[in-house]
Amino acid sequence: MRSHEEQRQQNIPQGSSRQRDTVKPEGYAGAPSSSSAQVAPSSREDRDDLLERMLRRENLLLAYKRVVRNGGAPGVDGVTVAELQAYLKTHWETVKAELLAGTYRPSPVRRVEIPKPGGGVRLLGIPTVMDRLLQQALLQVMEPIFDPHFSWYSYGFRPGKRAHDAVLQAQRYIQSGLRWVVDMDLEKFFDRVNHDILMARVARRVTDKRVLKLIRAYLNAGAMAEGALERTEEGTPQGGPLSPLLANILLDNLDKELTKRGLRFVRYADDCNIFVASKRAGERVMESVTRFVEGKLKLKVNRDKSAVDRPWNRKFLGFSFLSNRNATIRLAPKTISRFKEKVRELTNRSKSASMEERIYRLNRYLMGWLGYFRLASAKNHLTSFDQWIRRRLRMCLWKQWKRVRTRIRELRALGVPEWACFVMANSRRGPWEMSRNTNNALPTSYWEAKGLKSLLSRYLELRQPFGTA
């Protein structure tokens, strides 16, 4: 359901065949379409039984399957996903009664710090498996109510939308002549969400007071860090199934404001890019939108990371663009740096691991990474990556062949001439230098036989259906 103002944005060529991918992201229970048959009723009175709908058997079974499939670490009570079924048999009737009575109290989340790629840490809050189940069940009944009213240009954590759609929309804006971007970074967004403002937005479409009380209880549940309970008077902890929807509910106000002003934007969670025709226009937009975000939403814009710049000088969801007319999608420089850092970690010659184990771990990372970044034009990069990865594996193998006699035996088995075996085995050069000299002895076919997957080969397979291989 898009407003008149949003429809007016379609004056820019959109490429309708690609505009909305029908793939349903993992973790969603059937993407609701925009047809009137599937849109939830708009009247608030029809939602006073939302808790009963949340607790319906079929909804809970679906939520249970999703929680089990997603796995994850246990919360503060130590109950694992594998133990959830047994836990429910013992505690479910009590929990259900408390939910219906409005007296249920969620457990605090377990605070975990994970390092950010660019430095610093990101705070995660891991709920107990019981609370993950309840949040997932609540998400499944709330999402059809809110999602149809979200902006078309909001792509994060929504059924039927994904990061690739956001990047393609950004590319279309650049192709249309909007070759300046207002790149807004919301500082510690998930930690700064104002509870009162968020609950006011939720209450616009939900009148079941028990559900509102439950959501407020999750927001105020607190966090356990190093054995101490921390109060959570603001923020919605990353890690729970409900947090992304709550974030979109709050930021929908930003989307509506940008639409009202006739601005062209794409937003993925708290990552928002606004496209304009000139630097001067971008500076005006940055100033006015910052006032709105900090004044109306009580959030903070990170001025150090935000900028008005050319799109090809910025990164968006790990991608960037070329400055050509087609705004070709490319890998952002930081994406390449992080990729190499991870591969170095997996092929660290000082870490003891069998070659089979290294290749298994590499393949898992490489194929997952490529599954996301296949959108970029990266044939030359991937050719170079494949060569570099094979060289690093040759380095690890040479380090494993510590003794001269082991090296001679292994090289001889690979068909290396006898004289070359002795010269190479007795070389005083380090493993990295010898990884170049063993290229002919350990060619691409050797690593293919060992099961190493090629980034380039897989990339060409993935791009072929689009005719862009």
Image (cartoon, helix red, strand yellow):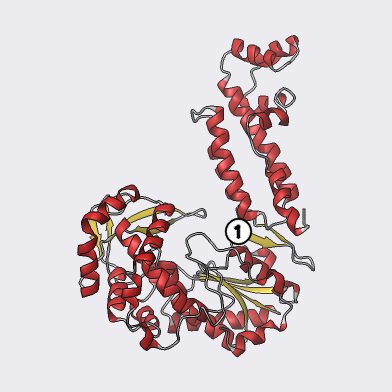
Residue 276 shows up from this direction? yes
At label 1, which amino acid type do we have? Gly
What residue sits 31% from the left and 62% below the top? 131
Q: For mark 1, does the 10 Å Cα neighbourhood hold few (<14), some (14 to 19), or many (20 or more) residues? A: some
Q: Is residue 9 left or right of residue 3?
A: right
In the picture shown, does residue 164 fall above or below 6?
above
Along the line of sight, which residue is nearer the eye, 240 or 275? 240
What residue sits 36% from the left and 88% below the top? 45
Q: Is residue 337 left or right of residue 134?
A: right
The residue that mark 1 highlights is 318
* On-image quarter of the N terminus: bottom right
In the picture shown, does residue 353 fall above or below 44?
above
Which percent across, then down, holds residue 445? 72, 29
Total marks placed? 1
Along the line of sight, which residue is nearer the eye, 426 or 270? 270
**Circle 1 — which element?**
loop
Q: Is residue 179 left or right of residue 140?
A: right
Which percent across, then down, holds residue 438? 70, 24
Residue 288 shows up from this direction? no
In the picture shown, does residue 201 fall above or below 409?
below
Which percent across, then down, holds residue 447? 67, 30
Tell me the quarter of the picture where residue 14 sits. bottom right
Along the line of sight, which residue is nearer the eye, 113 or 73? 73
Q: Is residue 53 left or right of residue 450?
A: left
Along the line of sight, which residue is nearer the eye, 215 or 26? 26
Which percent across, then down, holds residue 143? 45, 73
